[in-house]
Image (spheres, grey):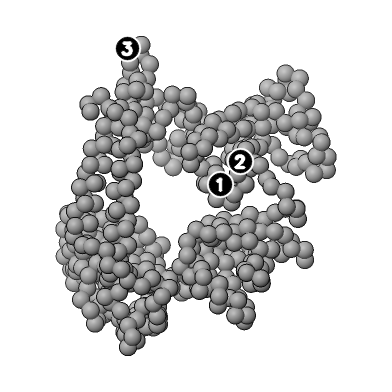
C-alpha cells in the first residue's frame, strides 16, 4: 500500500510517498535541502504531517523514523489518526484470529451465553495478564462482547479484542507494545505468577529439549503443547524449584558476563585511544564505481554432497551467521582470508561480511579486495555498509551480478583532492567499535549493581 502526503518542517511542508515503510521526500523547494542537512544520518526521531490515504481530506499522521539518509527516511512505524481531532488515545486495541485462538474465544463465549450473560450490552473481561516493559507495569485485558453505546460505530465483525491501557500516548510506546504483543499464529505464550526473567530462561531451555519430538507435520500446538511434559528441578514438596532455577541462571550469567568483559577490555586495548574526527555529515562525499575501488574475484561452486565436514568456514549467499553456511575441510581456488565477501545472489543479495579467517566461497559470493589500500577489518567494514546502501536497486529478477557490481557506484568520504579517504574510514570504524565496547562495559557494570547475590557468591 502506498501512502502519500506531506510532513511539517519549520514553516513549510515537504511532500512524501511511503511504500514498505520507506518514506521518500521530494520537492524542488530549498526546504528539502535544509531538511537533509538537519536530519541526514540521524536516528530515532519523530516527524509530524498529514496523509491522504483515503479520499481528499488529509488526516494527521505521526512518524517514528529509525534513520534517514538524504531524502529517504526509514520508518519504524507511523500512526494515522482515524478522526481529525486533537484528542489523545489512552489504550491500544488489537483484534486477530490468532489471539482469539490463544484466549479460547469460542469456548469462553459459549460458557458466558450459557451463564445468561448478555454480551450485546457491554464487553466482558475474560483474562487479565500483567507484564513489565521499560520499567513500567502494564495489564493486558482480553474482552468479549459489544458496546451498545457505540451504535453504528461498533465493529460487529469483531470477536475478541485485546485492550492495553497506555502510560503515555507517545508513538514510541505504541511501537514497543505492538512488538511485545506481535504473534504470528505459530507462537504461544504462557504466564505464571512465579515466573521471573531468571527462572524463565531456565524453563525455556528445558522446554527446548522437546524440539526433536516435533516437526512441520507434527507441530507443538494445541493439546500437544498442553500435554507435553518437561523435566524441571523440584523442591522438598515436589513442586518446581523456581528459586534454584533463578539462582542457577544468575550464576551462569555472571560467569558469561565476566568472560565478555575480558574480551571487550582486550578489544579496547587493541583499538587504542579514541581520535576525534569530523562527523559523517561534515565530510565531503563522492560517488565511485565499485570496480575502481575493488578487485572483484569469484567464488567456486561446492555442493554439500561433494564436501567433507571439517573446521574451515564455507561462505554462502546468506544474510546471517556472517555468511557461514557450513564448515568443511575442502580447499579450492576461492581459498581466501582478510577479505570482504559480497553476495550477488540468494536471500542475502548485496549483503557483505568481513572474513579475517581462512575460508572458501560459494559461487554465489564475490570476494572483494581493495585496489589502492591494504585490506583491513575497519576499512572493509565501512565499505560493507557503503555497498549495502545500494541493496534496494536489486532483486530476484535483477541480480547483483559481476557486470552490475562493477558498474554500481557507492558513496565514500573523500580527501581534499577528491580521492577516497581510507584513513577517515578506518578511524571512523575504530571509534564506533570503541564506543560500542565501552557502552557494553557500562551495561555490564549496571547489571552487576542490580544483580541479586547468588548462593555461591
Residue in the image at 24% along x and 67% along y:
377
Say which quarter of the image contains residue 381.
Answer: bottom left
Whether residue 226 is situated above or below residue 311 in the rendered picture: above
Residue in the image at 34% along x and 64% along y:
317
Compare marks 1 and 2 and give the one earlier in the sequence.
2
- Between circles 3 and 2, the one closer to the viewer is 2
Q: Quadrant of the N terminus?
A: bottom right
Residue 421 or residue 242, whichever sits in front = 421
Which residue sits furthest front?
Answer: 276
Residue in the image at 48% along x and 41% along y:
134
Does residue 376 show up? yes
Q: Quickly name the residue at label 3.
A: 236
Q: Quickly name the residue at label 2.
A: 166
Compare marks 3 and 2 and give the one earlier in the sequence.
2
Please say if the residues under marks 1 and 2 sit with CB atoms less than 8 Å apart. Answer: yes
Residue 38 picture location, percent across and down: 51, 70
Amino acid at each position: 500500500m502506498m501512502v502519500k502526503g506531506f510532513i511539517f518542517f519549520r514553516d513549510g511542508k515537504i511532500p512524501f510517498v511511503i511504500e514498505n515503510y520507506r518514506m521518500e521526500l521530494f520537492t524542488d523547494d530549498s526546504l528539502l535541502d535544509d531538511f537533509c542537512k538537519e536530519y541526514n544520518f540521524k536516528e530515532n526521531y519523530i516527524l509530524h504531517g498529514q496523509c491522504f490515504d483515503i479520499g481528499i481530506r488529509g488526516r494527521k499522521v505521526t512518524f517514528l523514523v529509525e534513520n534517514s539518509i538524504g531524502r529517504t527516511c526509514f520508518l519504524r512505524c507511523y500512526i494515522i489518526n482515524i478522526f481529525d481531532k486533537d484528542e489523545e488515545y489512552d489504550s491500544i486495541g488489537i483484534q486477530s484470529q490468532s489471539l482469539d485462538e490463544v484466549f479460547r474465544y469460542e469456548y469462553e463465549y459459549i460458557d458466558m451465553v450459557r451463564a445468561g450473560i448478555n454480551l450485546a450490552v457491554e464487553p466482558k473481561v475474560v483474562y487479565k495478564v500483567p507484564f513489565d516493559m521499560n520499567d513500567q507495569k502494564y495489564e493486558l485485558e482480553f474482552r468479549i462482547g459489544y458496546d451498545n453505546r457505540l451504535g453504528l460505530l461498533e465493529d460487529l465483525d469483531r470477536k475478541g479484542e485485546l485492550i492495553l491501557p497506555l502510560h503515555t500516548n507517545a508513538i514510541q510506546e505504541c511501537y514497543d507494545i505492538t512488538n511485545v504483543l506481535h504473534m504470528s499464529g505459530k507462537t504461544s505464550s504462557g504466564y505464571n505468577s512465579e515466573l521471573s526473567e531468571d527462572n524463565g530462561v531456565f524453563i525455556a531451555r528445558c522446554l527446548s529439549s522437546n524440539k526433536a519430538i516435533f516437526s512441520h507435520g507434527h507441530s507443538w500446538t494445541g493439546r500437544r503443547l498442553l500435554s507435553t511434559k518437561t523435566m524441571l528441578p523440584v523442591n522438598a514438596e515436589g513442586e518446581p524449584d523456581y528459586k534454584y532455577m533463578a539462582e542457577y541462571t544468575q550464576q551462569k550469567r555472571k560467569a558469561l558476563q565476566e568472560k565478555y568483559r575480558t574480551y571487550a577490555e582486550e578489544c579496547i586495548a587493541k583499538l587504542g585511544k579514541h581520535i576525534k574526527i569530523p562527523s559523517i555529515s561534515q565530510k565531503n562525499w563522492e560517488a565511485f564505481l565499485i570496480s575502481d575501488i575493488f578487485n572483484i574475484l569469484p567464488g567456486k561452486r561446492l555442493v554439500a554432497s561433494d564436501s567433507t565436514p571439517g573446521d574451515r568456514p564455507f561462505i554462502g549467499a546468506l544474510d546471517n551467521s556472517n555468511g557461514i553456511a557450513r564448515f568443511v575441510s575442502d580447499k579450492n581456488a576461492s581459498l581466501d582470508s582478510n577479505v570482504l565477501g559480497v553476495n550477488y545472489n540468494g536471500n542475502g543479495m548485496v549483503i557483505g561480511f568481513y572474513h579475517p579467517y581462512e575460508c572458501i566461497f560459494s559461487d554465489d559470493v564475490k570476494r572483494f579486495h581493495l585496489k589502492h589500500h591494504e585490506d583491513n577489518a575497519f576499512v572493509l567494514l565501512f565499505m560493507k555498509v557503503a555497498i549495502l546502501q545500494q541493496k534496494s536497486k536489486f532483486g530476484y529478477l535483477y541480480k547483483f551480478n559481476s557486470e552490475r557490481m562493477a558498474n554500481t557506484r557507492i558513496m565514500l568520504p573523500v580527501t581534499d583532492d577528491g580521492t577516497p579517504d581510507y584513513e577517515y574510514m578506518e578511524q571512523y570504524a575504530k571509534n564506533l567499535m570503541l564506543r560500542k565496547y565501552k557502552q557494553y562495559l557500562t551495561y555490564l557494570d549496571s547489571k552487576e549493581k542490580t544483580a541479586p547475590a547468588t548462593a555461591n557468591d
